[in-house]
Image: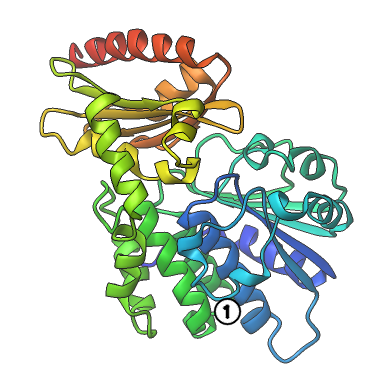
Amino acid sequence: MPLTIDNETVECIAKIFDKAKKTVIISHMNPDGDAVGSSLALYHWLNDAFFAGRDKPQIYVVLPHRCPADMLYLPGSNEILDAETDANTCNNVLREAELIIAVDLNNAPRVLPLDKALSESKAIKILIDHHHNPDTDLFHHIVSIPDLSSTCELLYWIFVQIIGDSSITDNTAQCLYHGINTDTGCFAYANEDATLYEATAALMKHPLNAADVHNRIFNNYSIRKMKLLGYLLDKHLRIFREAGFAYIYIDDKELADFGAETYDLEGLVNYTLMMEEMQVGALVKMSEGKVRISFRAKNDFDVNVFANKYFGGGGHTKASGATSPYDFNTTIHILEENMLNEIKAHNKK
């Protein structure tokens, strides 16, 4: 069965799309495949389908950080503005926008350092997302389906509902497919909704070169990143066998000493769950002077609840994250003590 969103809401946002003369599409800091894929997919769909054959508004894609190198193959990636390269331009287009469409995020802190410009902008703000707890005060209109596979899947169904499947161009399909792949771990994560596979099957009608996409996402480690992984697994992997919990940690000084950068840590949290006994995993790292934590789970332990309860973070039941309000060592202590206690309590239920 196709996914159907509340028709009144979809019609409302379509009318808003139609009226704005200056539109900004924005996604979260440290953008992943779903953030970049959903941003560019919406950009292409608006330009190539929604406004086809008529005057187009100014449409910008803005990200807090640079588009990762392994996503620069996506069509339109060269059009992205980012605050790392030109913060002034990003802040200005946000402040001058008539419409801001936020994708794959749920609140302003997720777009640091552009959070102030987003919050203070007088534009109409629309949120299209799949995370829990959307900021209902910040956004005027919200389409949010928590625990859907990805924002890219949600966008696919919105596009189909507004115009139809014929509105999905090759460029749009390529961006949507990339985002769906990354947020589902190439369909490995627990997501059994038929809508995911229906949407993917429709996208496969386009020339996506699925094997190439898989290699770009999952088989693209540099030699430096592979060596870093080996080092972390040897020196910075802590395992709590009885609890079924493991985490990897590294601070910014040691990362610099190794000659690596924060983006070299992307995806490494998943290695904590490759051990048969491990059911919950985490990665603790320093990024831009802040302690950030990624959580993963493969059983029914809810890492979204844990991230929110102890670090003010959030995300999904099996994949979540947080920016810790504590220093690095305190974060490690709070993570260990409370995770072990929470897993113990969870296992008693």
Q: Which residue is drawn at 66% across and 34% down?
A: 109
Can the viewer see residue 4 in this picture? no
Residue 127 against residue 157 in the figure, above or below: above
Left or right, residue 317 beside residue 40: left
Which residue occupies the foreground of this view, 67 or 347?
67
Percent from the top left, x then y, of residue 321? 46, 32
| Amino acid at circle 1 | Ile
Q: Position of residue 189 (x, y in %)?
A: 27, 48
- Report the side of 234 relative to 255 (left or right): left
Report the quarter where the C terminus lies. top left
The foreground one among 55 and 267 is: 267
Q: Where does residue 124 sit, x and y in percent of width and height?
A: 80, 53
Quarter holding the N terminus? Answer: bottom left
Q: Residue at x 58, y 26 (%)?
A: 290
Residue reaching furthest left?
Answer: 276
Residue to which mark 1 is pinned: 163
Q: Dividing the picture into quarters, in which one does residue 209 lie?
A: bottom left
